[in-house]
Each structure stands twice: as structure tokens, then as C-alpha cells.
Amino acid sequence: MFGFIEREQILLKQNIYDLLHNTRIGRKGFLFIFVGVFFIYVLGNIHINREATYDLYWYYVRYFYKLLGVCVVYDLCRRRLHDFGFSSNWLILWLLIGGSIYIYYFLSLYSFSALPVRFFERILLAELGILFIPTVLLYFLPSDVNRNRFGDSKIQMVSSTCSIGYIETKITLSNEKGILEYLRDIYLYRAFKVSGRSKLIEAGIGIGSLGTIMGLNVNILAFLLLIKSEMGIAILEPISWAIFYILYIYTLFAVFTLLIRRLHDSLYSAFWILLLVVPFANVFILYRLFIKGSWDVNSIKEI
């Protein structure tokens, strides 16, 4: 166990090094993360605005949430510009222009003697226009196919002198195993295994089958409770619920270990899975889990 944690810590440090030294993102990754960040920003602000009308605490949370969203969008744009080969200094001009428009619009609404009923909603629409319309236009920038001073979007750096390439991402069933074999590995043979790798197709099958497996657990519970009702044996009810919770926890744990192995397959530490509960950051982890290809040990090359 301690060996596993130590290896994950080493890999986590390397991932952080990579994020700081390879600051590019391709068009496919950019689009996925952009869409995820957009919906999290919109839904999060709507919820916080609703809560802020009743609780002063949420009123201040709103500003922190907005600032966090701006920082995430800024870094996403910075990496996209780097992929094109441009310096991120151009974003300073966008921040000045966008910030000036936002302040003018904000003060204009505040100048009314009575605030409009949908004041916060109108402010949110202004933010979306200023933040996301210029951002989505960056998608159309072509990628620099060669390595530039900002790194290489098609590799994962593993040291200052070497890099590992990725296999092209394809969601396909043309693998050496069929769906049943993958399900057997996920829920039986490798359910408790956190080491090793799981391919993109395995993560898709695991998440795709989760609802069916959970539904099967519920049906088993209902069947056992029906037997208890027909036979009138009271002890069967706690046994039925115990079986249900055991299967429920077992299923979730099997998927949890699958996601850890999938992170390994995209050359990321298992500790990153904790960010799945953090707004905005979870989009980047979902990209690693369900979009990023497998790293190819045969592609190690000198930088």
C-alpha cells in the first residue's frame, strides 16, 4: 500500500511538472473542456444567485466562483494560443477590453434607483458574452503541428529530456476482447486492482454499464423482499438490505478502481480523481478519463 502511494506521489509531481512546462492544448481537448466549463459556469452561477437572495454567505461565494471561472477560462485560452504558437500576452488586451465593457454594463444597471428584477441574470448574460464568445473563436485557430517553445500537445513530458507520445484516441470496439470480457475484468477479475492500466474503451463500457448493474442490484433487492413477503420470514428483510448495500458498494468500488487505472493509462496519478468533486477542475479530469488516448511506451523519444 505504501509503495502504491509513493509511486502515485512521484507521478503526481511529474504531472505538475508537465502542466507547467507543456502549456498547449489541441482543438479536440479545447472544445471538450470549453463546453464543460461553460455549463458548469452557467449552472453554478444560477444556483448561487438563487441562494444569494436568501443567504449573505452565498452573496460572497458568487464573487469567488466568478473569479475562479475567469481564471480557468484564461488558462484554457492561454494554452490554446500556445498551441497556435502565439504568446498569451494577447489575452491582456482581451482582459482590458472585456473588463471595461463589464464594468460599464455593471455600473449602468446599478445607476437605476431601483434595481431591475433580473439584475443578476442580466449581469450573467454579459459575463457569458464577454468570457465565452471570444474563447470559442480560439477553436478555429490551427494547431502548430511542430513542437514550439510552449511544448507539444501530442505528448506527455516525462523529464526535461524525454517525452512519451499518445496513441490516437478512437472509441472503437475493435479490440482483442469483447464487451463481456471487459465486463468480467471490470467487475470480477480487476475489481480490487488499482495498479495497471485500463483503456479508453474499458472506461466507456464501465460507466455505460453502471446504470444497468445498479438496476440489477435493485431488482435483486426487490426479488428478495418479495420472497420475504411471501414466506413471512422477518430475518430475510435485513439480509436482503445487507446484500443490496454490499453489491452497491462493490459496484461503485469496481468503477472507482477502473477510473484509477484509466488515469494511469493517460499517464496521470490516481490522486487526480479527487478533483472530480471540484467545479471546473473536474472537466479536465473527465477529459483525461474519457477523451485522452493511451500513452504508448514505444513512442518514448528524446526532446
Image: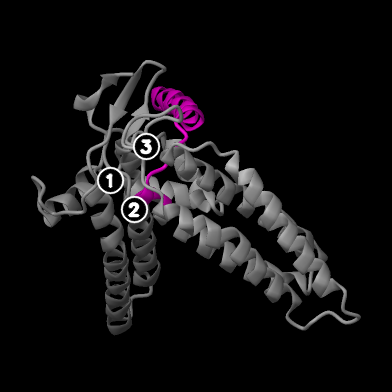
Q: Residue at x 10, y 53 (%)?
A: 178
Where residue 95 appears, as percent x and y from the top left, is 66, 50
Q: Is residue 208 above or below residue 298?
A: below
Mark 2–mark 1 CB contact (< 8 Å): yes
Decide whether residue 13 is among the magenta residues: yes
Q: Is residue 19 above or below residue 2?
A: below
Label 3: few (<14), some (14–19) or many (≥20) C-alpha neighbours in 10 Å:
many
Residue 135 is tagged as none
Whether residue 15 is visible, yes or no, is yes
Decide whether residue 155 is among the magenta residues: no
Q: Which residue is mark 2?
A: 250
Where residue 233 appears, as percent x and y from the top left, is 33, 76
Q: CA distance from mark 2 to mark 1?
A: 8 Å
Is 7 left, or right, of 231 in this rendering? Answer: right
Element marked by disc 2? helix
Q: Which quadrant of the view contains residue 83?
A: top left
Whether residue 47 is visible, yes or no, is no
Label 1: few (<14), some (14–19) or many (≥20) C-alpha neighbours in 10 Å:
some
Q: Amino acid at mark 2?
A: Tyr
Is 290 left, or right, of 44 in this rendering? Answer: left
Q: Which numbered disc, 3 or 2, marks the residue that appears first in the sequence? A: 3
Label 2: few (<14), some (14–19) or many (≥20) C-alpha neighbours in 10 Å:
some
Task: Depth check: give the residue in front, 35 or 220.
Answer: 35
Where residue 28 appears, as percent x and y from the top left, is 35, 51
Q: Which quadrant of the view contains residue 240?
A: bottom left
Q: CA distance from mark 3 to mark 1?
A: 33 Å
Q: Which residues are magenta?
A: 1-30
Q: Which residue is mark 3?
A: 153
Task: Depth check: give the residue in front, 128 or 215.
Answer: 128
Q: Amino acid at mark 1?
A: Ala
